[in-house]
Amino acid sequence: MENFIKNLLDGGWVVLLIGAAGMIARLVTTDEPQTGVGIAKKMLSSMIASLIAWFIMEQFEVDSMYKAIVYGLVGLNSPEIIQGVLKLSGQFASDPMSFIKQQNKPNSKPKPKKKK
């Protein structure tokens, strides 16, 4: 944490560009019309999500190419990632004990029957 700003300035800022590039790729390939404000919001969310991913991934020894791929994919999928996190946090905030109990339940899917 002490070197966060130094590391960001030394090369972490490139992660913002990688995340933004992922979102640009998404915006270029989509058919739905986009407003300037909508594009700016998506670009900002992709940059922030990629920065969070950088903060997490810098703690692990992983090849830099794989990290770059993760940053790009996080930028590409940032709206869905952020919506999922907000949904989970909303469920937890509404009833923490029920949420925890639900997460600790084993899968109760029926096992497929074997053919004889």
Image: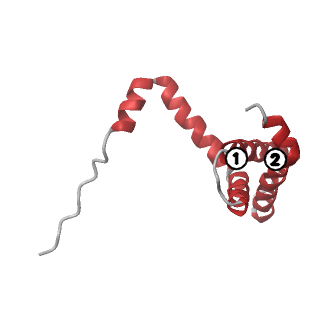
Image position, residue 102 (x, y; %): 37, 35
Is residue 39 among what the camera can see? no
Q: Is residue 78 visible?
A: yes
SS category of the residue bearing label 1: loop
| Numbered circle sitting on residue 58 | 1
Quadrant hosting residue 30: bottom right
Point out residue 111 in the picture as x, y percentages from the top left corner: 23, 58
Q: Is residue 107 above or below residue 4?
A: below
**SS type, badge 2:** helix
Residue type, label 2? Gly
Q: Residue at x 85, y 49 (%)?
A: 11
**Residue 10 screen position, x and y as percent:** 87, 46
In the picture of the structure, the residue carrying the numbered disc 2 is 12
Return the residue nearer the eye: 43 or 32. Answer: 43
Which of the marked residues, 2 or 1, is nearer the chain's N terminus? Answer: 2
Q: Is residue 90 left or right of residue 66?
A: left
Identify the residue at image location x=73%, y=47%. Answer: 50
Q: Residue at x 64, y 53 (%)?
A: 61
Residue type marked 1: Glu
- Above-or-below relation of 75 to 98: below
